[in-house]
Amino acid sequence: MREKKSIICSVLLLVSGGMLYVLFRSRHILMLKIADGTPLSRHLSHLRETASHWHPYDWVVYNLPGALWAGAYILFIHSLMHGVNASTRWKWACVIPLIGAFSELGQAFGVVPGTFDLLDLAGYLLPLVVYSIYVKPSIHCHEQ
């Protein structure tokens, strides 16, 4: 039952991040360009028009979606790997947040295209830190 709740929370985080991204980011993002010409385009345009009256903080629009997506991935992996030892689950949970963090650091050094943003880096790592605190006691119990 706990795994089912984790998966539901994971989906909610994924959808929340996606909605922030679609509603408040530039009209020129790839996701919206792909949706153009589909029946979904009209609905998205209506949602974007409705949301245009709200003015969330920049970090909510630009940084929070990545953090929500990293958290969604971690919860999904945690629930998907139920029954696997905590150390292995933790290693798999690290994959996407660390890819995000290293890509952000790559932007800082000009190795990866894009603009380095410290809040993006924090957004990728914070869910991992929280998960590590949650899982750490389980890892130590299994290692002893």
Image: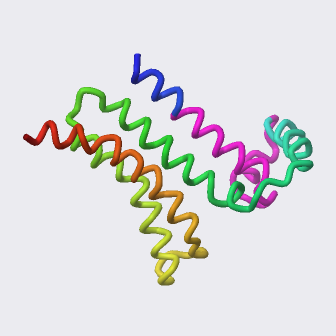
Q: Residue at x 56, y 76 (%)?
A: 113
Q: Main secondary structure of the magenta part?
A: helix
The quarter of the displayed image where residue 29 is located:
bottom right
The quarter of the displayed image where residue 119 is located:
bottom right
Q: Residue at x 79, y 37 (%)?
A: 40
The magenta segment: 10-39
The vertical placement of 92 against 11, above or below, is below
Q: Where is residue 35 drawn, in percent x and y?
A: 75, 45
Q: Where is residue 141 drawn, in percent x and y?
A: 15, 37
Number of residue marks: 0
The vertical placement of 70 against 115, above or below, is above
Q: Residue at x 75, y 51 (%)?
A: 32
Q: Classify residue 60 as left or right of residue 141.
A: right
Q: Classify residue 114 as left or right of residue 57.
A: left
Q: Classify residue 143 as left or right of residue 135.
A: left
Residue 19 colored magenta? yes
Q: Where is residue 142 drawn, in percent x and y?
A: 14, 37
Q: Which residue reaches farthest top?
A: 1
Q: Quadrant of the C terminus?
A: top left
The colour style of the image is: rainbow
Q: Quadrant of the N terminus?
A: top left
Q: Residue at x 28, y 40 (%)?
A: 89
Q: Where is residue 49 drawn, in percent x and y?
A: 91, 45
Q: Classify residue 78 as left or right of residue 103.
A: left
